[in-house]
């Protein structure tokens, strides 16, 4: 993921127990690249 994470990238994650350990490293990577997590609805321009 480090190679492909860039502005406009969409990274989908489920907040269930098996993926929980991955949340912190992904958040750290976003912060190091001055990126931030947004809801998918924001990225797609929907109000849902």
Image (tube, helix red, strand yellow):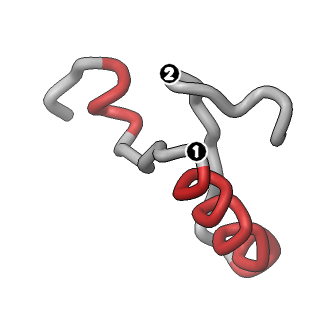
User: Is 28 on the left-hand or right-hand side of 31?
Assistant: right
Give above or below for 13 relative to 17.
above
Residue where numbered disc 1 is placed: 33
From the viewer's perspective, tell me whether residue 43 is left or right of residue 16.
Answer: left
Q: Residues within 10 Å of mark 1 (few under 14, many from 20)?
A: few
- 2 relative position to 20: left or right: right
Name the residue located 59 percent from the left edge and 63 percent from the top edge: 27
Q: Is residue 17 above or below residue 32?
A: below
The secondary element bearing badge 1 is classed as loop
* Front position in the image: 1 or 48: 1
Q: For the residues labelled 1 and 2, say whether their Cβ atoms are less than 8 Å apart.
A: no
Q: In this figure, which residue is indicated by the disc labeled 2?
A: 8
Of residues 29 and 11, the one drawn nearer to the viewer in this rendering: 29
Q: Is residue 48 above or below residue 46?
A: below
With 7 as the anchor, is 45 left or right in this view? left
Q: CA distance from mark 1 to mark 2?
A: 12 Å
**Is label 1 or label 2 in front?**
1
- Helix, strand or loop at label 2? It is loop
Q: Quadrant of residue 21?
A: bottom right
- Which residue is at 35% across, 19% downward? 44
The percent coordinates of residue 45 (x first, y second) are 24, 19
Q: Position of residue 23 (x, y in %)?
A: 66, 69
Position of residue 22 measured from the top left corner of the image (x, y, whole percent): 76, 68
Q: Nearer the viewer, residue 14 or 26?
A: 26
In the rendered image of this protein, does residue 14 appear above or below residue 1?
below
Viewport quadrant of the C terminus? top left
Name the quadrant containing residue 15.
bottom right
For label 2, the crowd category at 10 Å Cα-Cα, with few meaning under 14, some 14 to 19 and many 20 or more, is few
């Amino acid at each position: 993921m480090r190679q492909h994470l860039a502005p406009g990238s969409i990274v989908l994650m489920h907040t269930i127990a098996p993926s929980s350990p991955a949340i912190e490293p992904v958040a750290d990577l976003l912060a190091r690249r001055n990126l931030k997590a947004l809801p998918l609805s924001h990225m797609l321009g929907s109000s849902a």
